Amino acid sequence: MTTPPRAQTTDPPAAPSPQAPPSSNADRDDDSNDTRATDTNATAERDRSEFARRHADGSRDDDGDAPTPSLLGAWRWWLPVALAALALALLFVDPFAGDWDALDYTVLALRGEPSTMLFGRSLFIFTNHIAFRVAHALFGLSADDAYLLFKYTVVCEAPLAAVALWALARELTDDLRAATLAALMLAVSPFFVIYSGQAMTETPSLLLLSLSLVVHLRGVRQRRAALVLAGAALLGLDNNVREAAAIYGAWLVVAPFACGWKFSRRDLFSVAASCAVFFVCAFAPFLSFYLGDVNNYRAGWHGWVASMRAEEAVHPVGWLNFAPLLLFFFVAAPAALVALPGALRREWRARGFSPAFALACVGAAANLSLVTHYSAVINGRYLLTGLPGILPLTAAYLVRRATERTGDARRGFKRAATIATAAALVCGSVFYAVSRHTLGAHAVTKEYLARLQSLPPDAVVMAGGQTVSVNYYRALGYGHWDVIGTGGGFPGASRLADVIDGNLRAGRRVFVDTDSRLWFNDAWRGEETRALVALQTRFRFRRVSPTIYEIRPADDTSAQDDPQLARLLRQPPTPARRLLGWLKSHA
């Protein structure tokens, strides 16, 4: 005869319990509340136990046998990537300070003033200001060389950013190989490589962003309020390095529920508190300068807003902007963009709304939302914003797929790393080739002071692409030059001659640099060049250096030199501009 299932156990059956009296509705409600509280506490305890188990003794390594090492214990994984990031930053270090913004940041750091761009970027600027004050006091660093300090500080932050992303990816995936691939894809990203060698905000922002996400995620998983608030504070502070990081504020809301938090009063209060800390740290510095109107900051900020509106009129935002945006997204991380749809689908099917899935969605949304800003379709560096969110999930997906195809974890990792690196190097080579003209212009900035010193210290200068150099050297105290600017500072073809006439009547001497490297024929810059060429029929010119001419009134017969401005119209557009124009015309 078959033994009943209960009789198969080795323990003796328990004695029957006495019949309990029926409970009232109030008793049942109390029991239900106790049960829910017990379930919530049990979930929290399991989260804490799982976190402690993985990060203290560990539960798996790359093969699933040995414990997962700590960050320092796993140095063999992230150190080669960090060294690669440092080597690439040094190899492609900028010949001067970097893009136009880098010169503005340098001047502002020397003065100790926030930028008027958006929310001020005060953390980046004042950190550099303190660093300069210390270096000046200890080593006598001059203001002329301050850009070197700021630039090489960013170079040193490049490997730290790679390590921070490694830590974030390991926290999300619990996979050493996936974490290493994620950090490697960042280290070889063409935009990351180029801007890690400039005094720009991209690399410091990525470093602080990854660090804030790690701290916040650990706090959520361990249910430690201090870490949750610290992560929110760091994320808010990152808004004062680069404002695109503010898009990750959505992570503060979605992360707790992706980690299993409930819609209880305590959990909702913790989420609200983290959001409040984020908003204070993100916007309090800007509001203090704006509302307090420190050093007439409010007027400067509204001047920036006006210039942005002028730039947006030149570069209207529309659906066609998705073409260059997706191109730049692909250049930033080709393997990650291709793998992203499959990675999201696989993660959703396997784990649902997991932390890795949630962060990847936030990162993708951050990059796609940049289409609303005109600069994102001109310069691809903005597309670095979403990489800390996207790379951990896509790296885990690529490693898993390669492992399934090769049948071996090590060979799978090597295959995934080779494909991702090769794709980035191919895209990077093309990107560097089409951007060489722009990067080469930074070297002209370094030498431009010699040209300016041949002019009167109060001259009005038309320098085209080197307008920023005039402003930079004026801020360093070499002269009091004024400019007829470019882009948002250009008066327009219909008003250009009148602006020059006004300066001449006021007794100010006006000069134009006709170096062909400073003037362009593509899009809005072509309009400026055509407006310059039209001046030759209205004014006379006197040559003062190989490329610089003084603009004189038409009745000044002593000015008889011919600048041959029409030659500026015969130069072809840069490869990068031709590519962007083609994309917009075929989108």
Image: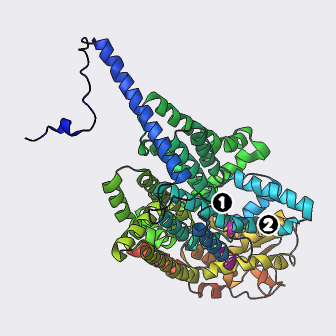
Judge the density around disc 1: few (<14), some (14-19), many (≥20) Cα neighbours within 10 Å. Answer: many
Type of the residue with mark 1: Pro
Callout 2 crowding tier (Cα within 10 Å): few <14, some 14–19, many ≥20:
some
Work out whether 105 lies above or below 233: below
Is residue 94 one of those drawn in magenta? yes
Residue wearing tag 1: 204
Mark number displayed over residue 371: none
Magenta highlight range: 89-101
In the image, 302 versus 20, the foreground residue is 20
Q: Is residue 10 left or right of residue 223?
A: left
Q: Residue at x 35, y 74 (%)?
A: 407
Residues at circles 2 and 1 in contact by the CB criterion of under 8 Å: no
SS state under label 1: helix
Q: Which residue is at 53% across, 74% downward?
A: 523
Mark 1 or mark 2, which is nearer the start of the sequence? 2
What is the x, y in percent for residue 516? 67, 84
> Of the residues shown, which amino acid type is indicated by label 2?
Leu
Q: Is residue 224 above or below residue 16?
A: below
Q: Where is the N terminus found, in terms of image quarters?
A: top left
Question: Relative to the observer, which residue lies in front, 126 or 23?
Answer: 23
Say above or below: 359 vs 101.
above
| Res 538 visible | no
Q: Which residue is mark 2?
A: 149
| Picture quadrant of residue 207 | bottom right
